[in-house]
Image: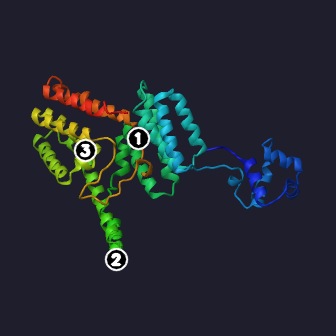
Amino acid sequence: MNGINLARTITTKRKEKQLTQDDLASFMGVTKASVSKWETGQSYPDITLLPHLAAFFNISIDELMGYEPQMTDQDIRKLYKELSIEFTAKPFDEVMGRCREITRKYYSCFNLLLQVGLLYINYGYYTVPDLDDEEKAAIVAEAKELFVRIQTHSDDHELRHLTMHLVATCELLLGKPEEVIALFQGKRHYPPATNEILLSQAYLMAGKVIEAKKELQNSLYDGILEFLSTVPSYLQLCVDDAARFDLVCMRTLQTIDIWKANKLIPAGMMPFYLVAAAGYLAHGAEDKALDMLHIYTEIANDLFPLGLKRDSFFDLVDIIAPDELPFGIAEAPRDENTIRESVVTAFTENPALNSLHENQRFKNMIRRLESAVLRTAK
């Protein structure tokens, strides 16, 4: 992550060629003293000499100057964690200034731009206190600008597809639903697991039965996760129809039970139970609401460490470590202690659950939840 390292490069490349400073000076038509100053960093070669130096060493001008427009994935992940901590501990303007400086330096490193854009939203927009609506909108607009740059200039199809959704997220945060409709309308994506099926068949033809099973297990697992993560949004749209709301809840609970989703994807299931509880309360079904919240607290007992799980059915799926996940989904938007707090506050400070605050069963759940989640925090 250093800047220009011309002196180091000239010294290294000259020695690799087993040349003296006199040899290099003679080739470049300068004095030995000039070469010495280049190598000690006291001065730089004239800009017109850079192409000749690069050609002499058989490297690009970027390589000659030691300029690295790309960061390694490891450095990006490290930087993300570092900046996420700074957003919670340092003045907001100071951290934003550092982010902007980094993106200017690595403006063609699209994985980095993606992570910085996510930082702006996850931390700048959602976490930093005391920002007014205009300041939050400015943060989102800046994130959107980074995502649009990736869409426009990256050659990575998957990265462009991901940033299209992130641009849509920014438009929603900016209160521009028509922009999102224009972005997606008429472009519905049907994602049959064609690649996974073909790859599984190829593995089978090659006699690699375990690999074939593993490929389709991963596809099934991803499909269940995607389906169940969609339910809370649909359920919220059904609150105006008590019968349909209950039907959606019952079918979802059956699906969860069949696939043991509370154990496999615990963090992914918790929003469903909160939305279900709020809807049942709105319909006057307090006992059903409390039943949903009871399951929420039970999941919280086994939530940490965060992550997806295997079981006896899904025994071959890839459980990828957080620092190995693709960019854009690798980093939780909060540190673990903040996530623990949010698990409790989503329960205790949820306005939709206000009517339960004097209910003894609800109070007991709060105590168990706080004991299970907060008191085990490191």
Tell me the amino acid under the disc marked 1. Answer: Cys
Residue visible at 30% across and 63% down in the picture:
192
Quarter holding the C terminus is: top left
Quarter holding the N terminus is: top right
Badge 1 local density, few (<14 within 10 Å), some, or many (20+)? many
Examine the rendered structure and indicate whether residue 91 appears above or below residue 203: above
Residue visible at 36% across and 40% down in the picture:
172
Tell me the amino acid under the disc marked 2. Answer: Met
Decide which of tag 2 and tag 1 comes sooner along the chain: 1
Q: CA distance from mark 2 to mark 3?
A: 37 Å
Q: Which residue is mark 2?
A: 205
Please, what secondary structure does the residue beneath circle 1 have? Answer: helix
Residue 170 is marked as 1
Decide: marks 3, 1 in contact (CB < 8 A)?
no
Decide which of tag 3 and tag 1 comes sooner along the chain: 1
Q: Picture coordinates of residue 291 (x, y %)?
A: 14, 37
Badge 3 local density, few (<14 within 10 Å), some, or many (20+)? many
Mark yes or no: residue 149 visible: no
Examine the rendered structure and indicate whether residue 75 appears above or below residue 157: above
Q: CA distance from mark 2 to mark 1?
A: 45 Å
Residue in the foreground of this view, choosing between 139 and 339 = 339
Tell me the amino acid under the disc marked 3. Answer: Met
Please, what secondary structure does the residue beneath circle 3 have? Answer: helix
Decide: marks 2, 1 in contact (CB < 8 A)?
no
Residue 269 is marked as 3
Please, what secondary structure does the residue beneath circle 2 have? Answer: helix
Residue 292 is marked as none
